[in-house]
Amino acid sequence: MSKNSYHVFFTNLANPLKIKIVMKLQEKEMGVNELCKSLKVEQSKISHALASLKKCRIVESKQEGKQRIYSLNKKTIVPMLKILDGHAQGFCGKSSCQGCGR
């Protein structure tokens, strides 16, 4: 992965709306309408954010009838989020992580 790829990947995850979508999809798979209702955000913004997350393969989609259902990439993103949660529990909130916002 090139440095530019890192930048694009982490920029996606630094966006507040995109991280809210990731957190919702961590709970369960959802369609656009369900994400809109849950996050109280208009459909065009959700769809645009999902397109960017899908392009970076952070989320995946499958067709169910007329609806597209989104989920997190189970091979890479789900394990990465578990590692990040472990890091936050083990290190954030301690003196070694003063600038992390907790």
Image: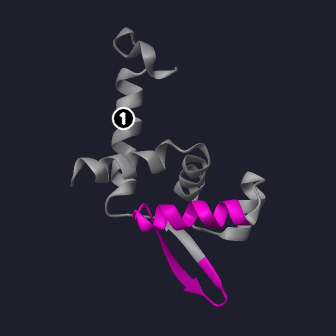
Relative to 48, is 81 on the left or the right? left
Region of the chain picked out in magenta, as a range: 44-68
| Quadrant where the image shows the N terminus | bottom left
Count residues near mark 1 (Cα–Cα under 10 Å), then give few for <14, some for 14-19, many for 20+. Answer: few
Which structural element holds mark 1?
A: helix
Percent across and percent down for residue 25 are 56, 58
Residue at x 56% of width, y 51% of height: 18
Amino acid type shown at disc 1: Gly
As drawn, the residue found furthest toward the bottom would be 65
Residue at x 67% of width, y 69% of height: 32
As drawn, the residue found furthest toward the left would be 1
Relative to 18, is 12 on the left or the right? left
Q: Is residue 57 above or below residue 79?
A: below
Q: Is residue 66 above or below residue 24?
A: below
Q: Is residue 93 visible?
A: no
As drawn, the residue found furthest toward the top would be 95
Q: Which of 80/90 is in front?
A: 80
Residue named by callout 1: 86
Locate residue 33: give its quadrant. bottom right
Locate residue 38: give its quadrant. bottom right
